[in-house]
Image (spheres, rainbow, N blue to C red):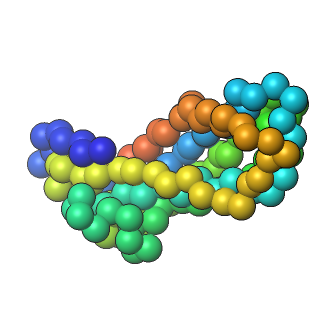
Amino acid sequence: MEIRYTPDPRLNLTGVALDYKVRFASGTPGASFQGSVVYTAYLGGDAGTLFLEANKLAEGTEDVSGLSAGGVCVEGQAQATAAQVQALQRGTFYVGARISGDATSNQEATVRYRTERFLLRLSGTVRP
């Protein structure tokens, strides 16, 4: 996803922190699950290279056996690299995510996911 904004020239960003939470839920009654799900978030300055390892911002893994009982959440926090902070400071940056893992089910099943939180906290200084 492309994000554009007009940077305030008085602002000097020194850090960016991500706080995320993604909920997975089964849409198939009676299904049981095993394995894990991996959520990986990316932030970069170019859409064409967003999903490169250098743009990885955070990664979380969770056991999926809880899908049978209502849901599983993958959540965490991460600090951006200096290159990611620079991308944000330019005024156009890209964020994205990939879901992977080795989860299996005892039957064909539907698993839905919803991003409940994807919060970027900026830190820095403001010049008068």
Vertical placement of 6 versus 124: above or below? Answer: above
Give x and y (percent) for residue 92: 18, 50
Q: Quadrant of the N terminus?
A: top left
Quarter of the rendering containing residue 15: bottom left
Residue 72 visible in this rendered orientation of the protein? no
Residue plotted at (60% across, 58% down): 100
Number of numbered discs overlaid on the protein picture:
0
Vertical placement of 1 versus 58: above or below? Answer: above
Residue plotted at (39% across, 51% down): 96
Name the one closer to the observer, 124 or 115.
115
Quarter of the rendering containing residue 38: bottom right
* 62 sits left or right of 47 in the view: right
Q: Quadrant of the C terminus?
A: top left
Residue 26 visible in this rendered orientation of the protein? yes
Residue plotted at (84% across, 52% down): 34
Quarter of the rendering containing residue 106: top right
* 102 sits left or right of 9 in the view: right
Give x and y (percent) for residue 56: 46, 65
Name the one closer to the observer, 4 or 100.
100
Give x and y (percent) for residue 72: 75, 39
Name the one closer to the observer, 124 or 19.
19
Q: Residue furthest front?
A: 108
